[in-house]
Amino acid sequence: MTLGEAAEELVRLGTDFHRRGWMLGTSGNLSTVMSREPLRVAITASSIDKGRMNPRQILEVDGNGKMLQGVEGRPSAETLLHLEVIRSTGAGAVMHTHSVWTTVLSDFHHGQGGFGIEGYEMLKGLEGIQTHEHREWIPVVENSQDMAALALKAHALLAEHPKTHGLLVRRHGMYTWGKDLATAARHVEILEFLMEAVGRRQMMEPT
Ligand SMILES: [Zn+2]
């Protein structure tokens, strides 16, 4: 995949996620693996308005987050977390959103280290899940501005929960991923749906 091809896809997804309220203002970032050996990743630049994205704001970084190619902006500090997820899970794309429901649920369930989602038909939209009887554990990690520390915590959580499809950062948002861009984007839709369903259900009958 070339940087131009990756940029076109990431701008399309970012614009769509902004419209749906999952990446408002400058929040969130999206990445996709361009090559593995050596690792080359296309990622949205730091602090760009997701409602006005353009392909010049998609950058190419190496496995350490160093920028190799790009016209506008610099890599976000959150690039380190994207690289950690790619290494830990073998993902081909990583999506980081800041929706209301992931923010609220990450706060509410932080004390338990996460929460389970089970019994919902929409779980079948997650890669490898064949039945609504699945229980998906969503880990929650405390927020930090120290991205290296946050990446270390994410590394430990993903080793502990290797089958999870996403993780939340407290009062911040969600990271999800997939084997390719289409799968990762689908996981955003499925998990955002599930988070809203779980959150609304809890408001009817608080636990
Ligand atoms: Zn963020």
Image (cartoon, rainbow, N blue to C red):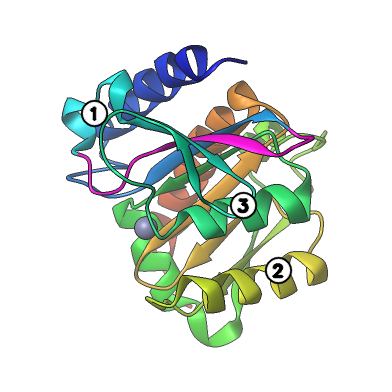
Mark 3 and mark 1: span between their CA atoms? 26 Å
Which disc, if any, is residue 19? 1
Amino acid of disc 2: His
Give the mark, 3 or 1, whose residue is nearer the N terminus. Answer: 1
- Camera-near label (1 vs 2) is 2
The amino acid marked with disc number 3 is Leu
**Are discs 3 and 1 less than 8 Å apart at CB?**
no
Location of residue 88 in the rendering, given as x and y in whole percent from the top left corner: 76, 56
Residue sitting at x 42%, y 20%: 7
Determine whether, in the image, residue 161 is placed left or right of residue 116: right
Count of marks placed on residues: 3
Q: Mark 2 points at which residue?
A: 155
Disc 3 within 8 angstroms of ligand 1 (CB): no
Of callouts 3 and 2, the N-terminal one: 3
C-alpha distance separating marks 1 and 2: 31 Å
The residue beneath circle 3 is 83
* Magenta highlight range: 36-48
Which of the pair 141/122 is nearer the observer? Answer: 141
- Residue 141 position by quadrant: bottom right
Position of the N terminus, as image quadrant, is top right
Which of 106 and 185 lies nearest the eye of the viewer?
185
**What residue do we see at 73% from left, 55% from top?**
164
In this view, 155 is above or below 87: below
Q: Which residue is drawn at 39% across and 75% down?
A: 107
Task: Please say if 14 is above or below 165.
Answer: above
Q: Say what secondary structure mark 2 lies in.
A: helix
Q: Does the residue labelled 1 lie within 8 Å of ligand 1?
A: no
- In what element is the residue under mark 1? helix
| Quadrant of the rendered image holding ligand 1 | bottom left
